[in-house]
Image: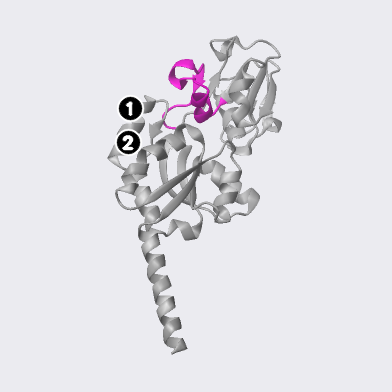
Amino acid sequence: MKKTLLSLAVAACAALTCSAAQAGTVSVGATPVPHAEILEFVKPLVAEKGVDLQIVEFNDYVQPNLATDDGELNANYYQHRPYLETFIKDHGVNLVEVCGVHIEPMGVYSKSIKSLEELPEGATVAIPNDPTNGGRALLLLASAGAITLADPTDITCTVMDITENPKDLDIRELEAAQLPRSLDDVTAAVINTNYAMAAGMVPGRDAILIEGADSPYVNILVANPDSAKLPDMKILQEALNSPETRKFIEEKYQGAILPAF
């Protein structure tokens, strides 16, 4: 009798688990702009299929991955592929890409100059202090001839890899989220599009230099291996890669953010 009751309990639990997976809650960590905005757009799309999308906002690039790795979050949406690859290598986490969603061209911004050619001798230029975005910023500066790098294709390059600095620029590494506020104190800053937009800047209008549409830095939905297998995650993936989401990105961001699907 006890074995029968136990079997029934296990079966009931399995049924509830299956039901929750089919129509449960998916928690996704995201930075506010544009990631959380895009998730807010798809929230009613997944709700139509019984999925409650819970969006947890972050303002840093470390905690969302750690929370996804240990299961506090089912997924996150805030980073590009090179950053994820570097993070996995540096932190030993077990995370996987679910799908690509969009590209955010990185740009150079300034309140005092209109082009990088106007950079004065000894000017201070701020860049992100995380390894991948810092390297990306240096590559962008090198593409405009402001500096020369030992390997102009190395996305993990650092200031130590600068071989030529003709204007003796002071490259200052700051937290990515702080870069828009640094514009009052530096000549120029290389800023991720999400933080530029959150600060009220329009990349296509305000950036004095911006990456092209062929940028390899696709922003992706990331999960831990268990969450990635959930039927609810498949529903979220389909919504993020839907024609409706493509139209939303194109119309809302007007080229500052590009669909990557």
- In the image, residue 26 lies at what x, y percent? 44, 52
Element type where label 2 sits in the image: helix
Residue displayed at 33% across by 32% down: 248
For badge 1, the amino acid type reads Glu
The quarter of the rendered structure image containing the C terminus is top left
Q: Does the magenta stretch include residue 71?
A: no
**Residue 212 within the magenta-colored segment of the rendering:** yes
The residue located at (55%, 53%) in the rendering is 72
Q: Out of 161 and 135, give the one closest to the viewer.
A: 135
Using the rendered view, name the quadrant where residue 213 is placed: top left
- Based on the displayed image, in which of its 4 quarters is residue 113 positioned? top right
Residue 248 appears anywhere in the view: yes
Quickly name the residue at label 2.
Answer: 246
The location of residue 129, given as percent across then percent down, is: 65, 33
When the figure is inspected, residue 79 is found, relative to residue 205, above or below; the finding is below
Which of these two is toward me, 53 or 164? 53
For marks 2 and 1 on the same chain, the one whose residue lies earlier in the sequence: 2
**Looking at the image, which residue is at 41% across and 40% down?**
39
User: Which image quadrant for residue 139?
Assistant: top right
Q: In the rendered image, which residue does mark 1 sit on?
A: 251
Q: Where is residue 50 in the image (x, y as percent from the top left)?
A: 33, 53
Q: Is residue 97 left or right of residue 231?
A: right
Tell whether 184 sits left or right of 208: right
